[in-house]
Image (cartoon, rainbow, N blue to C red):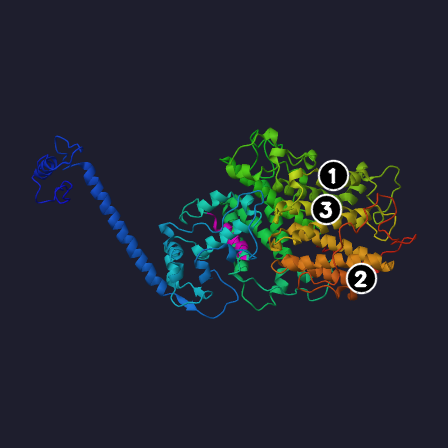
Amino acid sequence: MDQSVIRPASSAGNANCDSQRPCSTCVKSHAYARAHAAEGIPIPEEPDCTYGDEKEKEQLQSASKVQRLEGRISELETLLSEMQLALDVSRSPSTALSPSSYSISQMAGPSCQSMSPSNTLSPHTNGSHYYDTTGSYEDDMALAVAAVYSRTPSSLVPHTEQNAVVTVTNSRKAQLRAMGWPEQLPDPLVAKHLVHAFFAFNMHAGRLFHGPTFLASLNLHPTDPRFPMIGVLHAMCAVGSLYTADIPQPPMQPRAQQPYNGQFFHVDELFHGRWRAYERRPDSFSEEQARRAKTATEEAVDLGDRLVECLQAQTILTWFYLIQARWAESYTSSGQSLRCVPPCGLSIAAPFQCMTDAVEPGKTPAIIHEAKTVIEDETRRNVFWITYALERQAACGHSFAMAMDDLDVCQLLPVRGDTFEQGLPVDIRERQWSHDKRMFLSHVANQTDSFVLFIKTSLLLSEVKNFGLRYRGRYYRGETSMYAPNQVLESPATYDPRPSPAFKELDALIAAFRPSFPPNLRNPVQDEMVDAYLYAANCGAYLAQILLHEPHTRMTSLRDPSVPKLLAAARNILDLMYAISATSYDLSLLDHLPILAWNGCGRVLIRALRVAIDTDNLEQSLVLQAEIAFVHSMLSKAGERMPLAYRYKKMVYDFLANHCGPQYVESLPQTSYHQGRFPSPNDGFYPAAPPPGSGTLYAGGMYTADDLEPPAQMHAQVPRTHLG
């Protein structure tokens, strides 16, 4: 059929239109169609004339609007292309990236290989949602610059090397400022790259934030009130940069101007500014982003604005300072974070409240509004628990008081990760409370995952820490739980709390805690996959036993009941180290707690080695040297990307040299991995730990009948800056 005859109705602007309905054109077309119609094709009796239809006018207006928008988009893309050609390209190598510079490889969007600390690493789940690092990076038109980058990554800057550094010009900054993008943040694409890296690889990200909600808010216009707080984005960029090889990290330099004995840090180690002043280099990308996150958070707190997000940013910074071995900053940051919790009402939950008439009955006192959704409520609870856990775990490495008393914490334990992500409410009668001592040994099946066990481990470590800090004061106050039956009063210097009911109760709780884990949550390493939360919970359970017994143990005593418990805990930590070393898991993804436990394990083994040396037990000496070398090698490997592990590796090295002699560190590799002279012991090599009071520690007659005096180094007076 001739398409020139059957054509759409004419518009009002057509010269052939006669302004009648049906118009003459439609009448002629209808007559022709009826005359030449094929068999079986029905033709209406009257022509269907659409002349003058309002719908047709709307369609024409819509088409015209689309054409205008397409023209404007084309003009914008042309403008962006011209602006891109004006970028200054620096071909000189750079040791650090500032927020105003980024590499060409980053423009193409993140990839699993570039974001992973190890090419063999596969991101894993921690009982929470996994955020794919290869997701879409298309921006809305408000962030058109980033959208152009993601569409044409290979043609952004002509004739540039793959890893060349591109400096953002003033015109680029002006363009971003006009779009509302915060001036101090990295380029939009780089910032999103690092935020996705943070969610993909940081173990706390999926609990500290509700991932889908946060990532959706990141695509909003920067002026939208739901857009993430600037301090949070700075903190995420600081941590996210640790997981990508595109952004170099600052070098790890020896800090102490004087050597330390391996068990205590020199004071120069504690304060970042003392050694940083000697490094003639600019701040690295992560250091600058952390500094800006701190500034932005403090400014928001001064205004009382977005306080929960301020706490989230501060918690991320605390984790960053810990991993970077910035002791003073981590101590003050964790304390400040935890002191912000009570005014926000995050440490207690209804019906618990303070006894005052100023508080509305049944309402928790807080300076922030009540949570509007289940997700918001559980996010706040998770923020508190992660803040609490970081402070408690860091406190295990020093002898100072903690920032919050456990008696002031009356909060529900967190929900499971899948329940949190789906935003499902959970009946309060099915949940556990932090102040209920039964929760250590009772794990509700449908309300327990690895994160919940991680929080319980932090609470258990807090119990041990409080006992160690307060037992002398409680003894002086005359608390009956601190006195053994028929005990003769002793001076504080010689008082041994182990026979007291309080110590025995805590010791029994620690011994029963790890075996009480649900069967499906006992092995943190399965099929080459590592559950970081569960691994930390297992390490923390054994570390609690070391921290409880170590201050009161005489390793040289045949009759000391704490010695077999210390060695059993140390070798259980060794088993966990053997398990994770057999996988391709990147050790830099671990939290602070396992590294602290590894250091505690090494310290116990070194003290046992000293006894083996004094008793001329060559067999046990070789075994212990092999174990110490393995601990040192694991800390060395983790320390390749984690300054915290690097510092603890040096502590093990120096403690061994000071405690046993410099000849015993000759076999330890300085930086390499698995290069010790001594082989790892076979399974079943060690005898089972004897029951308390049996009077033996090792097979083979390691000890003589007489107790040996501890080495002189153990009685040396040292500053109270214990960090291991």
Judging depth in this view, the residue of 5 and 472 nearest the camera is: 5
Q: Which range is magenta? A: 228-241
Please determine whether, in this image, residue 525 is positioned above or below residue 502: below
Judging depth in this view, the residue of 494 and 149 nearest the camera is: 149
Which quarter of the picture shows residue 673?
Answer: bottom right
Which quarter of the picture shows residue 436?
Answer: top right
Question: In terms of sequence position, does the residue under pointer 3 or pointer 1 come before the other?
Answer: 1
As drawn, the label of residue 487 is: none
Question: In terms of sequence position, does the residue under pointer 2 or pointer 3 come before the other?
Answer: 3
Question: In terms of sequence position, does the residue under pointer 2 or pointer 1 come before the other?
Answer: 1
Please determine whether, in this image, residue 534 is positioned above or below residue 359: below
Q: What residue sits right under mark 3 in the picture?
A: 542
Amino acid type of the residue tagged 2 in the rendering: Cys
Amino acid type of the residue tagged 1 in the rendering: Ala
Label 2, label 3: how many angstroms apart (C-alpha)? 25 Å
Q: Secondary structure at mark 2?
A: helix
Which quarter of the picture shows residue 639?
Answer: bottom right
Q: Secondary structure at mark 3?
A: helix
- Left or right of 66? Residue 229 is right
Q: Secondary structure at mark 1?
A: helix
Q: What secondary structure is the magenta-colored segment mainly?
A: helix
Q: What residue sits right under mark 1 in the picture?
A: 512
Q: Quadrant of the N terminus?
A: top left
Please determine whether, in this image, residue 516 is positioned above or below residue 107: above
Residue 240 highlighted magenta (yes or no): yes
* Residue 686, visible in the rendered structure: yes
x%, y% of residue 19?
A: 8, 38
- Neighbourhood count class around disc 3 (C-alpha, 10 Å): few under 14, some 14–19, many 20 upward: many
Q: What residue sits right under mark 2 in the picture?
A: 660
Judging depth in this view, the residue of 337 and 219 nearest the camera is: 219
Label 2, label 1: how many angstroms apart (C-alpha)? 34 Å
